Image (cartoon, rainbow, N blue to C red):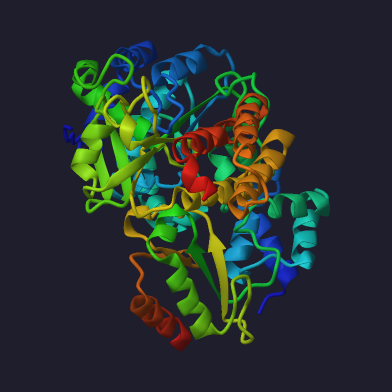
Amino acid sequence: MITEKEFVKELANKHGRTRESLMPILQDIVSEKRSLSEDMMVDVARELDISAADVFGTATFYSFLDTKPRGKYVIRICKTISCSMKGKIEILHTLEDILKIKVGETTADRKFSLLETNCIGWCHKAPAMLINDTPYTELTTEKVTEIIQEYIKK
Amino acid sequence: MKRVDLIFEKVECREILSKALEMKPEEIVQAVLDSGLKGRGGAGFPTGLKWKFTAAEKEPVKYIICNADEGEPGTFKDRQILDEVPEKVFCGMALASKAIGSKEGYIYLRGEYNFLVPMLQEKLENFHALMKELGHEFFIHLRLGSGAYICGEESALFESIEGKRGEPRNKPPYPTSKGLFDKPTSINNVETLVYTVMILRYGANRFVEMGTKDSRGSKVFSVSGDTPRAGIYELELGMSVAEFVEGFGDGDTKAVQVGGAAGFCVPRKRFDDTIIGFEGVPTGGSMKLFNSSRSMYNVIHNYLDFFEEESCGQCTPCRVGCQQLLEGIEAVKRGEKTSKYLDELVKLAATMKIASKCGLGQSVGNAFSSIVENFKEEIIY
């Protein structure tokens, strides 16, 4: 397995070392590791020859560029109006019951993080959520239970 | 209410492009100008003018950007367009590149739509091969957002592509003279770009024949909320809210939020005399219906919660204003403030409209004032 430093270097080789490469690099790290550690942000700063504060400032602006450790599967439930009208709260409670965590928390085995997010563009099929990049729509308590059971098996 | 089928109609992009690439840039701009097409992202700037201004710049490097950072609550049509007819979006960007004299384009796709990336990348490869075949030098980069609503604001989007915090810039200068990397840039919504393709395909007249003087053509609507027919519909512009509710309501509609959280709430008593379009209530497509079982307090609370989180925090009127509006209605609800306090909050929202740096802070007052003024008793009790 390659070290985090090597991983960052590879990403810089792939995307380039100009400031405009910063977002794609950070996005790739999150997609692989689910969040950005301070060490990795410092590594990115070194590769791009910009200040670590710049990297941190940029990363923390974007809600999907997590700087808190997250689980392998990040669940983001839409909390905006349509989903909230169509029973998002029951879905959230179901997930909290199954995973035994509250919003903002990660399971002890680091498999799941449960988060809320703003409109994800599935209002006509509300309530909806994302697990990492995959959208799940028209959720019911039964459906969301089935979905999570599948992920638990993975 | 008339259904239209232009956006999702399957067309031969190769044919349209090979013809259009033979045209002079001015002819393409003129066709779009003649159509009266206005931007479909919500702001409604005339597309032909945007292209004309960008074309007039003397800089050798210019950019065309497709704004696919569809984040307005209640809008989901751009996702569907990119999913079903991505070639038409690329084709629109190629037309724009010819019209304004650009060799490079960017699609800025919101991170919530990451699942579309593998498909889009594959289709982009085919598109680049087609460009080569047609001898038109034009390359499209695909860039992703990371969950920031504000990046749909054009100058915030440029900042984001440049690798920075998505904080809107001061205007002027406008993007047509100084946009991405400070170069002349035309930034257009996904749907707008597809309409330019159809205007070139069928001629400007086909578009002018539809809609009204201020709102030409048709538009893709994202319909959600209390409706038995939630979904995506392309409709001719110029209908009243009453006609819309007749087609989509559940028989008990008490209000329609037109244009998302940044838009206006139209109460039942105004359905008849309110036109959906630039002469009445404009919309980027978001149409949300509320029936009489809904608490409008919950609706505005949800919107303010949204804005408070999504405000970039750069300018004080928006950052503090959103917080104060939210705390204010909560205090009125709890009975800690009298109902008169709502008038103060409406004044604050009006101040935000004047004093905020960008469209986010400027439009918080739209939903706030239209809901508070029309449903005062629901906010108080």
Q: Residue at 32% across / 54% down in the picture? A: A124
Query: Where residue B76 sits: x, y (%)?
Result: 37, 47
Q: How many marks?
A: 0
Left or right: residue B298 versus residue A51 is left
Q: Position of residue B243 (x, y in %)?
A: 21, 33
Quick check: B195 above or below A82? above
> In the figure, is residue B103 to the left or right of B293?
right
Whether A139 is drawn above or below B139: the answer is below
Q: Is residue B314 left or right of residue A85?
A: right
Q: From the viewer's perspective, is B204 left or right of B56? A: left
Against B367, is B197 above or below?
A: above
Q: Is residue B101 visible?
A: yes
Front residue of B94 and B160:
B160
Where residue A125 appears, as percent x and y from the top left, is: 33, 59
Question: In x, y percent, where is residue A126?
Answer: 36, 60
Q: Hey, which quadrant is residue B339 in on the image?
A: top right
